[in-house]
Image (cartoon, helix red, strand yellow):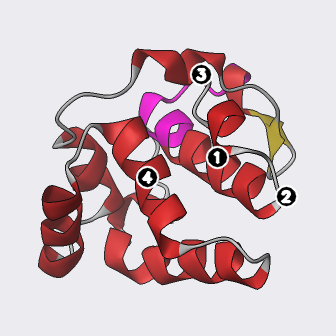
Amino acid sequence: MANHRIYTMTFASVYPHYVNKAERKDRTKEEVDEIITWLTGYSQEELEAQIEKEVTFESFFAEAPQMNDSRALIKGVICGVRVEDIEEPLMQEIRYLDKLIDELAKGKKMEKILRK
């Protein structure tokens, strides 16, 4: 696995950017949290604990209780790369999250974002 800088960044350092991106488009922190808990299987309390502990992205995804099987339905381009074509598992998980937050900020309905 390549040593990408984001792997060692704390999830807590990026989380406010997810929230800010959503709020700038009249979406909410609660919706961001719903996306994260849907993707990772963390409860709200577990998510808050991970943020408080300032775990790295690598640890955040490694410790996720149950990655959602429906994440394979997430398709599209993020940072110029198709998420479904990313070969590194950790980078793909990170980009899945980025893609979901982008969809939220673009006004997609939560049912579509959560692949219901």
Residue type at numbered disc 2: Lys
Task: Classify 103 as above or below 87.
Answer: below
| Quarter holding residue 106 | bottom right
Task: Identify the residue under disc 2.
Answer: 106
Q: How far apart, in angstroms, are the residues tagged by discs 2 and 1?
A: 10 Å
Q: Residue 66: x, y in percent?
A: 23, 28
Nearer-the-camera pick, 13 or 29: 29
Q: Residue at x 52, y 41 (%)?
A: 91
Q: Nearer the viewer, mark 1 or mark 4?
A: 4
Q: Determine crowd level at label 3: few under 14, some 14-19, many 20+ residues with C-alpha closer than 10 A.
A: few
Residue type at numbered disc 1: Leu
Magenta region includes residue 87: yes
> The magenta stretch spans which residues?
85-93
Task: Identify the residue under disc 3.
Answer: 116
Q: Quadrant of the N terminus?
A: top left
| Mark found first going from the N terminus, 3 or 4 | 4
Majority secondary structure in the magenta region: helix
Q: Determine crowd level at label 1: few under 14, some 14-19, many 20+ residues with C-alpha closer than 10 A.
A: many
Residue 77 numbered tag: none
Q: Residue 26: x, y in percent?
A: 75, 77
Residue 34 numbered tag: 4
